Image (tube, rainbow, N blue to C red):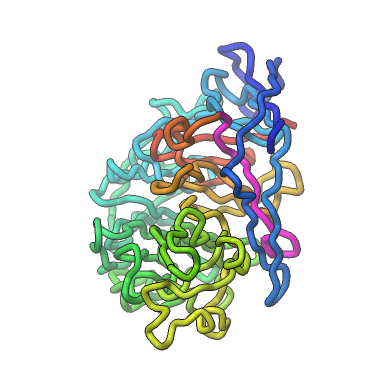
């Protein structure tokens, strides 16, 4: 990626009409090269191209980088952002610790503010391209709300670590909601440092509710806390259903935070894998580039996806590794008489991921682009938010990636919205992407909990 150019906007205080996502402006460019995304690592992501086969498609170059003046004042432009040619990013709203978000049919952005335990409606009434402090309303405020949010059949749903709640909601409501009901209760929590506490919630076309729960520790003794449960439409309608009464739809998923249905009605998820991996026969401490984070397709109910017994290779030492997506036994289970490398590679036991992503980038959401403003070749592709690593040097993640699909299957990922600078990304770049949504004009919304921003990304026609 060396030699890629980056451009900075000239001028301040520019106002752009509301229907124009981005506008052309004079730019000053330099030929400063970008740095490698990861020293010596080419980001080869094994991707399934047909049943039982894979290729090692390298990460694609995102093209010439531009930072354009976007909708709203140019002072809202996201500093030090690198995007493919023609795209632009700006701060659309500033809130408290934003996590999951959903775009309502009228264009309002409903976001969970984790530290506040609040769901807030954000909107742009005056058409200046941003949601100001006066353009928001608190919908609900309940201690413990931390991530999950969705809409279905006249209700707003949100989750805490232990339950799923709902409130009657009409599109366009910008006032406090009442009539709180419990939908799912008794979701397990606790564990080492509290365990994983996000409970992502999604509905399918039949009105069935899917709730993910993440592991209690780095490596649990079994998969009890690492699965997705599915609740029937009748259970959802009745409410107050115990978590254990839901069907185990998918098992062996360490922390499947991002869940989304594609246009074909298929459920996909992105998985956060384990830390501090050390296996003597594979090179000892291999945690820097292993295990891979995963993009999973849930094509069949009741299947097992590996955790905690197995992990996916991303990059192992030469002479040892067998390529991205290869399944290996976790060192804590490999000698238990059952969970060997061979067991993990048997697709009757473990469903391998459709695509693997770099270790520790922490994917937290996935969305399939169905807007009208990005180039046609992007429609049907997925965007994935990489929250970023915490125990890897150099740090990686802290970006939004595009996953390119061909014939309904992912073939590679490539950088889309990332840090345009040098040095440690985790120290120099304030944004840690979390939730994703597509706006009414086709813009991509990205929440960043670390910087307290809702970032909008548009395309210049």
Which one is in front, 160 or 320? Answer: 320
Q: Looking at the rendering, which quadrant does residue 88 occupy?
A: top right
Which one is in front, 344 or 68? Answer: 344
Quarter of the picture holding the N terminus: top right
Q: Residue at x 33, y 59 (%)?
A: 196
Callout count: 0
The answer to whether 72 appears left or right of 158 in the picture is: right
Quarter of the picture holding the C terminus: top right
The answer to whether 177 appears left or right of 92 in the picture is: left
Q: Which SS does the magenta portion mostly show?
A: strand
Q: Looking at the rendering, which quadrant does residue 83 occupy?
A: top right
Which one is in front, 170 or 1? Answer: 1
Q: Residue at x 44, y 56 (%)?
A: 154
Q: Residue at x 23, y 49 (%)?
A: 143
Report the span colored magenta.
405-421
Which x, y percent locates residue 212? 40, 65
Residue 428 visible, this orientation: yes
The answer to whether 314 appears left or right of 119 in the picture is: right
Residue 348 vs 205, above or below: the answer is: below
Which x, y percent locates residue 95? 38, 34
Residue 177 within the segment the image draws in magenta: no
Residue 266 visible, this orientation: no
Residue 208 vs 364, above or below: the answer is: below
Which x, y percent locates residue 298? 55, 72
């Amino acid at each position: 990626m060396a030699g890629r150019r980056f451009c900075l906007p000239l001028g301040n205080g520019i106002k752009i009409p509301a229907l124009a996502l981005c506008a052309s402006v004079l730019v000053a460019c330099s030929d400063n090269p970008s740095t490698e995304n990861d020293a010596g690592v080419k980001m080869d992501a094994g991707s399934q191209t047909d049943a039982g086969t894979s290729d090692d498609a390298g990460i694609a170059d995102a093209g010439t980088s531009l930072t354009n003046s976007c909708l709203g004042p140019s002072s809202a432009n996201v500093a030090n952002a690198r995007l493919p040619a023609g795209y632009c990013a700006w701060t659309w709203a500033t809130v408290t610790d934003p996590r999951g978000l959903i775009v309502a049919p009228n264009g309002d952005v409903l976001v969970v503010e984790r530290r506040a335990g609040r769901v807030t409606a954000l909107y742009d009434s005056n058409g200046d391209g941003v949601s100001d402090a006066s353009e928001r309303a608190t919908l609900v405020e309940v201690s413990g709300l931390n991530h999950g949010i969705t809409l279905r059949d006249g209700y707003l749903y949100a989750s805490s670590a232990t339950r799923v709640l709902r409130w009657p909601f009409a599109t366009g409501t910008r006032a406090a909601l009442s009539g709180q009901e419990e939908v799912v209760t008794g979701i397990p929590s606790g564990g080492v440092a509290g365990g994983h506490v996000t409970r992502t919630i999604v509905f399918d076309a039949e009105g069935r509710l899917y709730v993910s729960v993440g592991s209690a520790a780095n490596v649990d003794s079994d998969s009890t806390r690492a699965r997705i449960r599915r609740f029937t439409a009748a259970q959802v309608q009745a409410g107050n259903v115990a978590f254990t009464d839901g069907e185990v739809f998918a098992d062996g998923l360490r922390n499947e935070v991002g869940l989304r249905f594609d246009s074909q009605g298929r459920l996909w998820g992105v998985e956060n894998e384990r830390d501090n991996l050390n296996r003597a026969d594979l090179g000892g401490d291999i945690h820097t580039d292993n295990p891979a984070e995963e993009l999973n397709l849930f094509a069949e109910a009741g299947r097992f996806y590996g955790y905690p017994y197995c992990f996916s290779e991303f990059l192992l030492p030469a002479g040892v590794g067998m390529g991205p997506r290869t399944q290996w036994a976790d060192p804590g289970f490999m000698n238990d008489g059952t969970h060997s490398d061979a067991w993990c590679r048997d697709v009757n036991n473990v469903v391998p991921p459709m695509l693997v992503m770099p270790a520790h980038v922490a994917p937290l959401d996935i969305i399939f682009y169905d807007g009208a403003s990005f180039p046609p070749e992007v429609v049907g592709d997925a965007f994935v938010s990489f929250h970023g690593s915490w125990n890897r040097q150099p740090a990686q993640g802290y970006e939004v990636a595009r996953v390119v699909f061909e014939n309904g299957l992912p073939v590679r990922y490539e950088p889309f919205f990332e840090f345009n600078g040098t040095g440690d990304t985790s120290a120099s770049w304030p944004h840690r992407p979390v939730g994703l949504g597509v706006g009414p004009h086709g813009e991509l919304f990205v929440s960043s909990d670390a910087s307290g921003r809702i970032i909008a990304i548009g395309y210049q026609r």
